[in-house]
Amino acid sequence: MKVAPEILSLVPYSPGKPISETKREYGLSEVVKLASNECPIGPSQKMMEAMTEALKDINRYPDGAAFELKRAMSKYLKVSPEKMVFGNGSNELIDLLLKVYCRPGDAIMISEYSFIAYKISAQASSVDVIEIPTRAQMKFDLAAMATTLESNDKIRLIFLPNPNNPTGEYFSTTEFKEFMKTAAERDVLVVLDEAYREFVRADNYPDGIEQMNTYDNVVVLRTMSKVFGLAGLRVGVLVAPESVTDLINRVRNPFNVNSIAQAAVIAALGDKDHLKRVQVITWSGVEQIESYLKRQGLRFLPTQANFVLFDAGFEGDVVFKELLKRGVILRPVTNYGLPTYLRWSVGLHDENEVAMKALTEVLSVLRN
């Protein structure tokens, strides 16, 4: 059967290399994975108890309306339940936004080095991608994006990950408000993807919920995969005006968030001690990694997330493979057009030390 050329040419998303595969491939007994921006500690006791309790009713379908989950998230984010839609990870919600607001031939606008999932989802939907070059330090050029928006009527969605993956960079409240002087007057939806919101320490960060309450065409994506440590359960949430959530609910699949995941998220949102512990570990780990990179004389980008993007000075794929031999998984970002860079997810202190030792060995070999 005939298949659309956009599908035939689509390069699927490539996740971080699994620990089990690395062990098999290289005959290793211990592997440190710091490649997928995952939480370095597992779920708390409260989360485990909630999931265990939920297993008793696993023969029943989950609550398709996610009533208790919405109530818990409403308390956490301080928005009404009607302004939320949950998805099987943020990726499903990105797909649903494209399904509702774009037709083939329409366009989304992103920045260079943005999270690659937007581009993949758009191509799968036969939607064009307008990619705006970044400024120095790989910072988003919101002024250039505003200029492009003024001259292009095809744009329906603008994806702004803040902080951004894989760079860790962010844009300020002042920059965003200036951008919205143009975007607020256009027939577009501005999507603030805040997957790493809980790690941000910058004082001038534009909180997405506040921006959504200010502008009619701003929506926010949040996830339970990062600071909450529930990546394996796949839960994302879209926070938006009711006019948006109503449309998304019309096209989303029923029961798209399973009952175990709903129970775990409710417990996680109420476990402030666990949240704080992850934040402290992450912030300490960022400082540990950045200090090491400085000692090695390696260029890196300041980060507001739970990872550090650095320039290894050699082909990233080569460094990646040499690290695998030593039981360490980092993430090359060649697919972002950054052939000598790797992304280093923050792990526990000892895991970071193992990665440092392995990277020092690899760079020593490559430099000689």
Image (tube, helix red, strand yellow):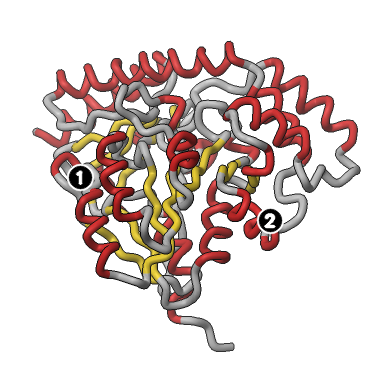
Marker disc for residue 213:
none
Q: Is residue 287 visible?
A: yes
Please name the amino acid that badge 1 sits on: Thr
Q: Residue at x 68, y 56 (%)?
A: 249
The mark tally for this picture is: 2
- Name the element at disc 2: helix
State the image coordinates of residue 168 (x, y, percent, origin top left). Answer: 31, 35
State the image coordinates of residue 351 (x, y, percent, origin top left). Answer: 41, 20
Above/below status of 282 relative to 20: above
- Name the element at disc 1: strand
Q: Residue at x 58, y 15 (%)?
A: 274
Q: Residue at x 33, y 42 (%)?
A: 166
Above/below status of 214 relative to 230: below
For the N terminus, the quadrant is: bottom right
Distance of label 2 from label 1 (alpha carbons): 42 Å
**2 or 1: mark nearer the eye:** 2
Please name the amino acid that badge 2 sits on: Asn
**Residue under label 1:** 340
Residue lying at the far bottom in this picture: please name it: 1
Q: For the residue carrying disc 2, how many other residues have a C-alpha within 10 Å: few (<14), some (14-19), or many (20+)?
A: some
Above/below status of 237 relative to 349: below
State the image coordinates of residue 280 (x, y, percent, origin top left). Answer: 43, 13
> 80 or 64, which is in the foreground?
80
On screen, residue 310 versus residue 65, left or right, reads left
State the image coordinates of residue 212 (x, y, percent, origin top left). Answer: 48, 42
First reached walking from the N terminus: tag 2 or tag 1: 2
Q: Is residue 334 visible?
A: no
For the C terminus, the quadrant is: top left
Q: Quadrant of residue 292?
A: top left
Q: Quadrant of residue 176?
A: top left
Q: Residue at x 31, y 65 (%)?
A: 130
**Residue under label 2:** 249
